[in-house]
Image (cartoon, rainbow, N blue to C red):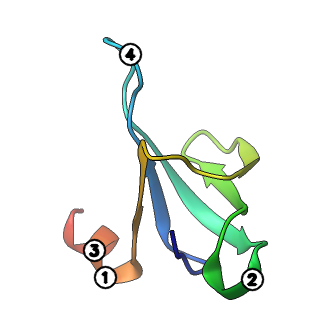
Amino acid sequence: MHANTGDQLLVHGRTVGQHDRVAQIVEVMGSEGEPPYRVRFEDGHEAVMSPGPDSVVRGHDEARLER
């Protein structure tokens, strides 16, 4: 997985009824865009994440097109 600051991290729900979550990547802590990432969710909550296979990185342009 590779990301840049400002990209979005889409975390798919893992169980029935759990919604997808979208977070903005505010800091890339790994080398060359690799995890872990410091992210900020839509509700303002921040976390350090090493995303798994249930996550997708969307670049600046991809995120802008979906709005």
Label 4 to label 1: alpha-carbon separation: 29 Å
Secondary structure at numbered mark 4: loop
Q: Amino acid at mark 3?
A: Glu
Residue 62, labelled with which disc?
3
Nearer to us of marks 2 and 3 is: 2
Secondary structure at numbered mark 2: helix
Q: Earlier in the sequence, mark 2 or mark 1?
A: 2
Q: Earlier in the sequence, mark 2 or mark 4?
A: 4
Q: Is residue 54 above or below residue 2?
A: above
Q: Earlier in the sequence, mark 4 or mark 3?
A: 4
How many residues crowd mark 4 within 10 Å: few (<14), some (14–19), many (20+)? few
Residue 31, labelled with which disc?
2
Residue 7, labelled with which disc?
none
Whether tag 4 and tag 3 are in contact, CB under 8 A, the answer is no
Residue 15, labelled with which disc?
4
x 24%, y 62%: residue: 67
